[in-house]
Image (cartoon, grey):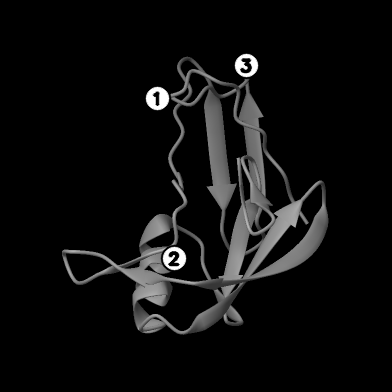
Amino acid sequence: MKILGIEKGDIITQVDNTAVTCTNDLTSQINKSNGNDMQITYIRDGNEQIATLKAIKSNDNTYKIGLWVRDTAAGVGTATFYEPETKRFAGLGHGIVDSDTEELVEIASR
């Protein structure tokens, strides 16, 4: 599925030139848009891309963009870490599987 160019596996890095590192950051930036157009910067296959989206106000008075975004993963019997400052990730043992979809999580970096 695509939402204005954004596809499953893409990594959202910015909203309106403000860095986002987790779903809370993303949700906050989407709500700050007040339904105005916003630019979403994302990474696909190591390439930075930009999509322009407009959030829609939902019944709970928050804004939604129609994407299901995850920022959690779990590994059993492995040593893993993510360093936000350098955006470095390392894992030892096996691939990381999404607990809801049971699909292998692709890890990308810039």
Cβ atoms under marks 3 and 1 closer than 8 Å: no
Taking the image as shown, residue 52 lies to the left or right of residue 31, namely right
Q: Which mark is residue 26?
A: 2
Q: Label 3, on which residue?
A: 94
Q: CA distance from mark 3 to mark 2?
A: 29 Å
From the viewer's perspective, tell me whether residue 96 is left or right of residue 25.
right
Which residue is painted at 18% across and 64% down in the image?
59
For the C terminus, the quadrant is bottom right
Mark 3, Cα crowd under 10 Å, few <14 / some 14-19 / many 20+, is few
- Residue at image mark 1: 100
Label 3: which secondary element: loop
Residue placed most toward the observer, 85 or 41: 41
Residue at 65 percent of width and 37 percent of height: 90
Which residue is at 48% across, 26% downward?
98
Q: Earlier in the sequence, mark 3 or mark 1?
A: 3
Q: Is residue 50 above or below residue 105?
A: below
- Residue 37 in the image: state x and y as whole percent: 53, 81
Query: Residue 44 versus residue 87: which sits nearer the camera?
Result: 44
Residue type at tag 3: His
Residue 30 sits in quarter:
bottom left
Q: Quadrant of residue 41?
A: bottom right
Q: Position of residue 38 (x, y in %)?
A: 55, 79
Q: Is residue 28 above or below residue 104?
A: below
